């Protein structure tokens, strides 16, 4: 096993800390032990520019003492030092105000099957055989440099191993181990008038054999070249098509609005939406956290609560909030998973590819990137800068830049026309290219 993985000695130490905290007066304790090993090779204009090797580990203690609560962390993993740390932490918690809403989750909600950490098949032991020379070769393999029009090309290859163990005084023992392999390139090109345009492309996967190295830098170069020659487009209402690469910009605020903290603070445009239908019939969003081998999947959340596959929004109806034990107690509601884990938007409209989606909608503006802007979590109103392409007859006509889209998220999603089926598996949110009708664009 990789040296990055938690050792028996470290696990034994975490278990000792659990027992020791109880001996010192904590009625309930949760401990999370984590360790990460990362290697990175950076390249610039065809040559290795930087290297990095980092090993991080930490232990986090959540202490429930006399109805009071505190969270503490340390990267010192030696017994005597941690015992002194725990004594001081418990003394600090005793000085806080009591909060009756603080408690560990009910034992029957905890994950029971994450014993080895590798149950989801997210650990690839090929990371153990990688050498510095091999990593260098992987970083350079994908480069497009030199290329006519390409004035700068920056890339990174990295691999990492993450291992964590969460235990508590109710018998929780939940481990998660995963590897990640990632390649990314950014290209800057120049037109005949000296104007610069930049774009990127990347890929990531838990398994080395699935990493799409070839063509990564070329894709970034092609995306940058496509931006040359932008033209102004008049303000007005257009069909909005959003590339799958950046579509999370429009869904993440919806998920955040279903989060317990936002709801409890009344800082959410989806307050009191559970069981109601604020979204259209053709929108279904699932949480699929337990799929074998998929990026972002987990068997448990940070409380150790078991994840499960479930609808978040089903045919427009809000089916769940995301409430950890504390927030649920404060709101007087049943607790759930604390956050969405592996989000999937179900395709609608019968289009497989983005090209088919463009043909279906005919005319509009394809957004390939967002540049600044903001949204109001309480009202759902937003204003985002965009870049992309004018679409006529289902085809790209010319690039557009420096435009704004404005509206509200409920109104936007109720104008969903269709989607492609092109979600990128390297992303934690499986969102395909999306098309919305009659969206306000301003130049």
Image (tube, grey):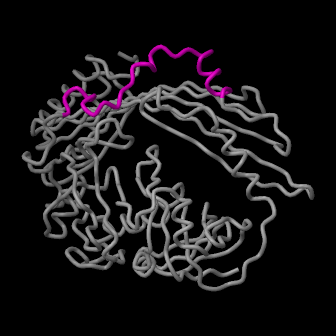
User: Residue 154 in magenta?
Assistant: no
Q: Which residues lie in the magenta part?
A: 114-141
Location of residue 304 by image quarter: top left
* Left or right side of 194 for 138: left
**Residue at the location (50% across, 73% down)?**
375
163, above or below 381, in the image: above
* Left or right side of 31 for 41: right
151, above or below 195, in the image: above
* Left or right side of 271 for 15: left
Tell me residue 307's x, y (percent).
21, 48
250, above or below 172, in the image: below
Q: Nearer the viewer, residue 385 or 83?
A: 385
**Residue sitting at the far right:** 193
135, above or below 32, in the image: above
Quarter of the image with the N terminus in it? top left
Q: Nearer the viewer, residue 258 or 433?
A: 433
Tell me residue 214's x, y (percent).
62, 32
Location of residue 154 by image quarter: top right
């Amino acid at each position: 096993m990789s040296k990055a993985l938690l050792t028996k000695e470290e696990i034994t130490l975490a278990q000792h800390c659990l027992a020791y905290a109880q001996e010192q007066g904590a009625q309930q304790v949760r401990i999370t032990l984590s360790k990460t090993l990362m290697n990175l090779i950076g390249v610039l204009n065809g040559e290795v520019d930087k290297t990095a090797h980092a090993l991080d580990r930490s232990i986090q203690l959540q202490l429930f003492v006399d109805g009071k609560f505190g969270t503490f962390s340390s990267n010192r993993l030696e017994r005597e030092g941690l015992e002194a740390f725990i004594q001081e932490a418990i003394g600090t918690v005793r000085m806080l105000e009591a909060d009756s809403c603080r408690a560990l989750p009910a034992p029957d909600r905890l994950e029971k099957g994450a014993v080895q950490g590798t149950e989801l098949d997210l650990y690839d032991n090929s990371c153990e055989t990688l050498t510095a020379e091999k990593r260098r070769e992987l970083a350079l393999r994908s480069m497009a440099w030199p290329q006519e029009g390409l004035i700068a090309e920056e890339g990174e290859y990295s691999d990492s191993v993450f291992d964590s163990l969460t235990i508590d005084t109710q018998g929780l023992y939940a481990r998660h181990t995963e590897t990640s392999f990632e390649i990314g390139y950014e290209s800057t090109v120049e037109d005949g008038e000296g104007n610069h345009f930049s774009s990127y492309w990347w890929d990531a996967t838990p398994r080395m054999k699935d990493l799409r190295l070839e063509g990564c830098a070329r894709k970034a170069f092609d995306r940058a070249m496509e931006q040359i020659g932008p033209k102004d487009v008049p303000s007005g209402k257009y069909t909005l098509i959003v590339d799958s690469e950046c579509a999370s910009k429009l869904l993440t605020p919806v998920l955040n609005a279903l989060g317990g903290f936002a709801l409890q603070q009344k800082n959410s445009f989806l307050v009191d939406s559970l069981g109601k239908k604020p979204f259209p019939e053709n929108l279904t969003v699932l949480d699929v956290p337990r799929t074998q081998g998929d990026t972002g999947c987990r068997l448990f959340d940070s409380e150790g609560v078991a994840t499960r596959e479930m609808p978040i929004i089903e045919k427009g109806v809000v089916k769940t909030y995301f409430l950890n034990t504390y927030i649920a107690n404060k709101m007087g509601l049943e607790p759930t998973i604390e956050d969405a884990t592996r989000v999937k938007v179900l395709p609608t409209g019968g289009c497989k590819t983005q090209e088919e989606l463009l043909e279906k909608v005919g005319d509009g503006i394809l957004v390939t990137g967002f540049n600044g802007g903001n949204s109001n979590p309480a009202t759902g109103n937003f204003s985002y800068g965009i870049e992309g392409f004018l679409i006529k007859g289902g085809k790209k006509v010319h690039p557009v830049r420096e435009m704004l889209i404005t509206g509200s998220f409920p109104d936007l999603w109720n104008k969903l026309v269709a989607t492609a089926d092109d979600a990128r598996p390297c992303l934690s949110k499986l969102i395909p290219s999306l098309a919305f009708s009659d969206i306000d664009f301003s130049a």
